[in-house]
Amino acid sequence: METLDYRPRLHVLVCTNERPPDDLPSCAPNGAREVLDALRAAARRRGLRVEVQITPTGCLGWCHAEGTTVAAWPAGRFHRHVRPTDAEALLDHLLAERPARPT
Ligand code: FES
């Protein structure tokens, strides 16, 4: 086992869980992959690909039939109904809550 002491400025988890059509709603059929890609592109445009970790994940427990669920740490907040068009504003909001550490 190896332990890495790395704390990103933000760690954003994007639910990409997919359930069968006859099951509960899930995020994958509601644009989860597009949300993930849009958030990653927004981070890249800001030069924050390393500082901001954006990770696809399984169910975050806030399933809904509209949009995607996104969680951000260290704030520990969940955002529901996220659409790809929300990515820029959501990332700006999250970054404002978590200013860059002085170097
Ligand atoms: S399936 Fe996405 S939060 Fe549950």
Image: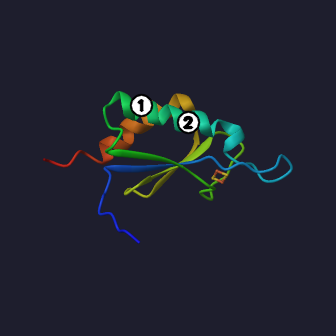
Compared across the picture, whether 9 is left or right of 31 comes to left
Q: Which mark is residue 99?
A: none
What residue do we see at 33% from left, 42% from top? 95
Query: Distance between the Cα atoms at labels 2 and 1?
Result: 10 Å
What amino acid is labelled 2 in the image? Val
Residue 100 in which image quadrant: top left
Of residues 68 and 39, which is closer to you in this image? 39
Q: Earlier in the sequence, mark 2 or mark 1?
A: 2
In the displayed image of the protein, which residue is found farthest to the right?
A: 22
What amino acid is labelled 1 in the image? Ala
Query: For mark 2, what is the residue?
Result: 35
Against 99, residue 77 (above or below) is below
Compared across the picture, whether 34 is left or right of 25 comes to left
What residue do we see at 40% from left, 38% from top? 91
Crowd around label 1: few <14 · some 14–19 · many ≥20 (10 Å): some
Q: Which mark is residue 42?
A: 1
In x, y percent, where is residue 26? 71, 48
Q: Quadrant of the N terminus?
A: bottom left
In the displayed image of the protein, which residue is found farthest to the left?
A: 103
What residue do we see at 63% from left, 56% from top? 59
What residue do we see at 38% from left, 44% from top? 94
In x, y percent, where is residue 77? 46, 54
